[in-house]
Image: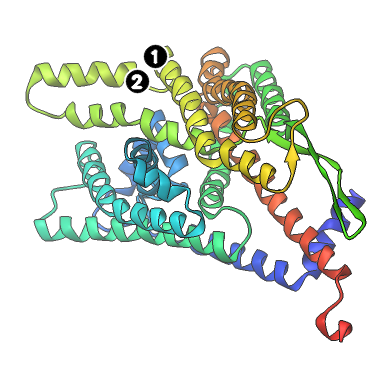
Amino acid sequence: MNKLISALNQIWSSRDLRRKLLFTGGILIIYRLLAHIPVAGMDRNALRQLFSGSQILGLLDIFSGGTLANFSLVALGLGPYINASIIMQLLGVVFPKLEELQKEGEYGRELVNQYTRLITVPISLLQGFGMYFLLKSQGVFGNLSPLQMIALLVTITTGSILVVWLGELITEYGVGNGVSLLIFAGIVGRMPIALGQTAATLETLNLGNVLVFAVLSLVVIAAVVFMNEASRNIVVQYAKRMKAGKTYGGQVTHLPLRLNQAGVIPIIFAVSLVLIPSMVGKFVEQVPNQAIANAAAQIVAVMTPGGWIYSLIYFLLVIGFTYFYTAVVFNPEKIAEDLKKYGGFIPGIRPGTATAEYLSGVLNRITLVGAIFLGLVAVLPSAMQGVFNIPTLSMGGTGILIVVSVVLETVKSLQSQLLVRNYEGFLPTSSAIL
């Protein structure tokens, strides 16, 4: 406890970190205020009843940052941007030039991010159009004139771009990853509602099941922390060099390879895709053709959260995106090249291509462990909801995973920035040298 208080004092005493924390908090407050400003022309009571009885919409609301349940100005949240990011990552596999651009450092990443923002706009329009017809079929919206429809689509598309901009502001001027923090804020903002709904149903639930579910939640939190911190340390040795009669190098260090290189991104990507069939099915159910409507209803029934087919597809998507995103963020060839350039080598492994192949093999093995863990945590809530019959907490595992991962990521960002400032305190200033 004393160490925690001391660390908080150090963070707050740093002017730069204090400014970043206050900036991040201010952006999150603005975002939560926007999330409570509903668009015009809807029945809020019908919307509230619809979301309280739909697991699909409830999960979609989590990844919109808690803005969809109010159908606010930022109702679509970060969903279109996440889908645009998935499209760009997949296009990078199909088009080698785009893949090269993604690996060109800061300039390449900024250009890819600009393309992602541009793709976000048409995706926002399509999602807004589909969401309107889905809510209209449930009595939330009435018939809108063409001008009112255009105004609605422009409003929620602008809101989605605004949320992306707020997330990028946090990433650039605040603390941590802005997109992850906005989703984190939405989940935390919905927790009081979920706990209240659970408390209201405790009379009809088995108290023993609730306690077991609470213990499992603590176990999941501990496991998430352990897996996020776990790493495989690769021994790296640097060759000795003689210069001006002095010996340099020769030290032995470690290259840490994390079991979960991708963090929470695979969960976000997988949910964005696994919900598409059920959302499209809900929309197609309203067509006059009875055969098509029946087929759509079957798709919705199969892909409803809690079903084994839904859980299996969700599990496989999480594993696939974990490997995919790890390949994007970690480049064994670049690491091997850097080691060779600075005289480093892995004992028993030749520098260059052999080192890159060795790192790829190790990374594939440890990523499998991390990917399976992420997949199990993602589908565990659906299984537990059926066993313990706690419907209001059916999406808790995914939320816990995101919250814990974002907290760990933010804490590490603060620690690294604090460490840099502590080192700066030991370095003499230019005036002191002169």
Determine contact: label 2, label 1, CB under 8 Å. yes
Question: What amino acid is labelled 2 in the image?
Answer: Met
Q: CA distance from mark 2 to mark 1?
A: 7 Å
Residue count near mark 2 (Cα–Cα under 10 Å), binned few <14, some 14–19, many ≥20: many
- As drawn, which residue projects farthest toward the left? 289
| Residue at mark 1 | 309
Say what secondary structure mark 1 lies in.
helix
Residue count near mark 1 (Cα–Cα under 10 Å), binned few <14, some 14–19, many ≥20: few
Instruction: Left or right? Give the position of 81 relative to 427.
Output: left
Question: What amino acid is labelled 1 in the image?
Answer: Ile
| Residue at mark 2 | 303
**Residue at image coords 55%, 61%:** 170
Q: Give how far across and how far down residue 353 sits, in percent.
A: 59, 32
Instruction: Give the answer, above or below, for where 202 lies relative to 91.
Output: above
**Residue at image coords 41%, 29%:** 55
In this picture the colour scheme is rainbow
- As drawn, which residue projects farthest toward the front? 245
